[in-house]
Image (cartoon, grey):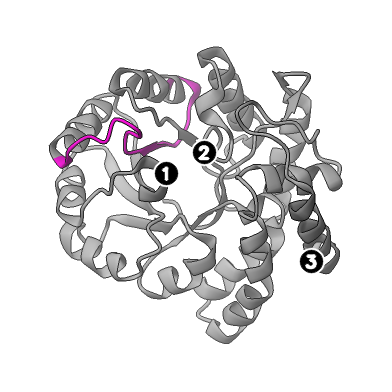
Amino acid sequence: MFFGSIPALVTPFCDGKVDVRAFRAFVEWQISNHSQALVPCGTTGEGVTLELDEHKLVVETCINQAQGRVPVIAGAGSNATHRAVILAQIAKQAGADAVLVAAPWYNKPSQQGILAHFTEINKVGIPVLVYNVPRRTMVDISVATLGEIAKLSHVIGVKDATGNIERVAQQRNACGDGFIQVSGDDGTALDFYRAGGLGCISVTANVFPRQCAAVQTALRENNIALAQELDTSLQAAHAAMFIDASPAPAKYALAKLGFMQNELRLPMVPANTHAQTVLDQVLSELAS
């Protein structure tokens, strides 16, 4: 259902508001450059700073622009379960193909609390991708807990941003062969795929969609040598996307490419001068 290069889309802002026109053009560019699904309102999209009406606007705009050409997986994460349920309902009503839901952050719930969180979201009735990103949430969804979550009727897979390749086999054993596993870590996405994953929900693909898609296509065609060559050429870009607090580097690069304003919503601020220098170099080497 979901595979390949899947950008976790940035949200363009202009004078403090969502820039719908820029976002439409950005979604179109992503599709024309072979991104195989889209994720609006995730971490990279500054989803936690969007008001509910803005969240709805971004999701609907993405779906309307995509017009069914690629799946749309709407971010629906919150550290309040009731809010995550509302976001999942918004996504379902808008026609999203699935929602991406992180473990609650800051609260640091127990494994039982994490299971209860996803149990409530499951009741919305839309396919759910679990998002495990311990370095942001400060809680790790254990393999055993993910196995229990996978039993819920609408949970279909996981975005794994642990960077631990051994998790792929462990989670397959716990969740079954049909459970979708996509990487949430650009730098290890190739190894994740070779271990049994299906693709990557990517930050780098915001700026280099064609190149990221080419890696995933080569992997699906079992052209490992080409995939490794392409992946090696992208490693500097992967590092650059996190040389300052994300999504500041991606937004700076996209502003340089003319897609949007270099505007973030506090507490996020634009990339620092060192990051800009590094990004300029990466753009000169890879953008075409």
Q: Secondary structure at mark 1?
A: helix
Q: Compare marks 3 and 2 and give the one earlier in the sequence.
A: 2
Q: Residue 32 appears at what percent x and percent y?
A: 73, 50
Badge 2 vs badge 1, beta-carbon distance below 8 Å: yes
68 relative to 165, above or below = above
Q: Secondary structure at mark 3?
A: helix
| Residue at mark 2 | 43
| Residue at mark 3 | 286
Q: Secondary structure at mark 2?
A: loop
Q: Is residue 142 magenta?
A: no
Is residue 191 shown left or right of residue 33?
left
| Residue at mark 1 | 136
Per the rendered image, the range of residues in magenta is 93-111
Q: CA distance from mark 3 to mark 2?
A: 24 Å
Asked which quadrant contains residue 81, the reply is top left
Q: Residue 22 appears at what percent x and percent y?
A: 77, 31
Q: Residue 221 appears at what percent x and percent y?
A: 53, 76
What's the amino acid at mark 3? Leu
